[in-house]
Image: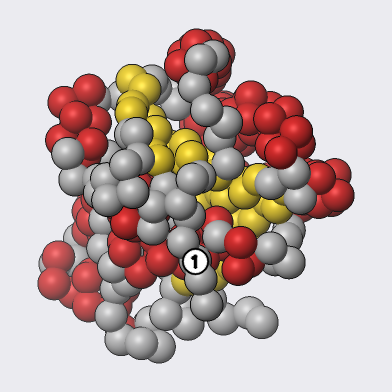
C-alpha cells in the first residue's frame, strides 16, 4: 500500500507539539511539503529543522493564534497568495480545560467554539477552491474520542467535539463529488502535554496522587498504555494519502480500544 504524499502540500495547525508536530514530521517523511501553524515562532523554527527534505520539499511556517480566527485567516491567506495549493489541511489546536458542567461559562464555550470550529471552517474556506480546481483534497480534523463517548468534567470539550463532527459530516457530503474528503481522527489518551494537563486537573479535583491518577487513566485502555503522538500521525498520513480515497465523512478513533461504542 502506497501512502506517499510526494508533491502534496500540507497545512497543519498546532504543529509545534504533540500530535500536530508528529503529523508534520510523518507527512514530511512521506514526501509532503509542510506549512506549520502555531503562535510561538521559536518553536516553529525548531520544528521546521526536524522536517525531512529528501524529495526537495519546501517547508514553511505561519505565526498565528487560533484564539483569533479572523487574524489567523488573514495570515494564512497572505502566506498562500503566491504559494502552491494546499492539498492536505489538518485542523488541530489545543483542547479546552476540564470543567464540570455547572462551572463552565459562556466564555469557555465561545473560546472553544472559535478555536475549533470557526478556525476549521475559515481555513477550509481558504483552501477548498483550489482543491476543487485540481480535484483532490484532504481535510482532516484532529478531535477526540469524546466525540463518541462524552466524559464527566469535560462539558466544553464534549460539546465542541460533537459540533465539529457534525460540521465535518456536512462538509464531506458537499465536497465528495470534487474529490475532497473530510474526516475526523479521534485520539484517545495520547502522551502529549494535553494528557498531562488533564491529569493535573484531575489531581487537583480529586486530591489523588499523580501515580494513582495516571494509573487509573492508563488501565482502562484495552491495550494497557497511552498512545504515542506518532501513532496518531500515521493514521492521519493514511487518511491524507491516495490510498484512503474512498474514506469520507467518518469519525476514526485511534485510541487503543478505549472508546466503548461500536
Identify which residue, 250 or 57, lies in the foreground.
Answer: 57
Total of numbered circles in the picture?
Answer: 1
Give the answer, above or below, for where 111 lies relative to 91: above
Give the answer, above or below, for where 10 lies relative to 221: above
The answer to whether one can see residue 52 in this image is yes
At 52% across and 77% down in the image, what residue appears?
A: 1
Give the answer, above or below, for where 4 lies relative to 262: above
User: Label 1: few (<14), some or many (≥20) within 10 Å?
Assistant: some
Left or right, 91 with reference to 197: right
Label 1 secondary element: loop
At 54% across and 14% down in the image, what residue appears?
A: 81
> Which part of the image, by quadrant, shows the C terminus?
bottom right
Name which quarter of the figure residue 62 lies in.
Answer: top left
Left or right, 225 with reference to 65: left
At 14% across and 67% down in the image, what residue appears?
A: 209
Left or right, 64 with reference to 50: right
Scheme of colours in the image: secondary structure
Q: Pointer 1: what residue?
A: 3
The percent position of residue 147, horizontal first and vertical second, equals 60, 59
At 48% across and 40% down in the image, what residue appears?
A: 9
Amino acid at each position: 500500500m502506497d501512502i506517499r504524499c510526494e508533491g502534496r502540500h500540507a497545512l497543519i495547525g498546532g504543529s509545534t507539539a504533540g500530535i500536530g508536530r508528529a503529523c508534520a514530521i510523518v507527512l514530511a517523511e512521506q514526501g509532503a511539503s509542510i506549512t506549520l501553524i502555531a503562535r510561538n515562532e521559536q518553536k516553529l523554527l525548531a520544528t521546521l529543522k526536524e522536517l525531512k527534505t529528501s524529495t526537495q520539499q519546501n517547508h514553511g511556517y505561519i505565526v498565528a493564534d487560533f484564539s483569533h480566527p479572523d487574524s489567523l485567516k488573514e495570515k494564512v491567506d497572505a502566506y498562500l497568495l503566491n504559494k502552491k495549493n494546499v492539498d492536505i489541511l489538518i485542523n488541530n489546536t489545543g483542547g479546552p480545560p476540564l470543567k464540570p458542567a455547572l462551572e463552565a461559562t459562556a466564555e469557555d464555550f465561545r473560546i472553544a467554539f472559535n478555536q475549533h470550529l470557526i478556525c476549521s471552517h475559515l481555513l477550509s474556506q481558504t483552501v477548498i477552491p483550489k482543491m476543487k480546481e485540481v480535484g483532490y483534497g484532504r481535510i482532516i480534523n484532529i478531535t477526540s474520542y469524546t466525540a463518541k463517548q462524552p466524559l464527566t468534567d469535560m462539558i466544553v470539550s464534549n460539546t465542541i467535539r460533537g459540533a465539529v463532527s457534525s460540521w465535518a459530516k456536512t462538509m464531506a457530503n458537499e465536497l465528495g463529488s470534487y474529490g475532497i474528503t473530510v474526516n475526523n481522527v479521534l485520539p484517545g489518551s495520547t502522551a502529549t502535554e494535553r494528557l498531562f494537563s488533564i491529569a493535573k486537573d484531575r489531581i487537583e479535583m480529586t486530591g489523588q496522587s499523580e501515580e494513582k491518577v495516571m494509573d487509573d487513566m492508563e488501565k482502562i485502555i484495552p491495550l494497557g498504555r497511552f498512545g504515542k503522538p506518532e501513532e496518531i500521525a500515521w493514521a492521519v498520513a493514511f487518511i491524507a494519502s491516495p490510498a484512503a480515497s474512498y474514506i469520507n465523512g467518518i469519525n476514526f478513533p485511534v485510541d487503543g480500544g478505549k472508546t466503548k461504542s461500536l
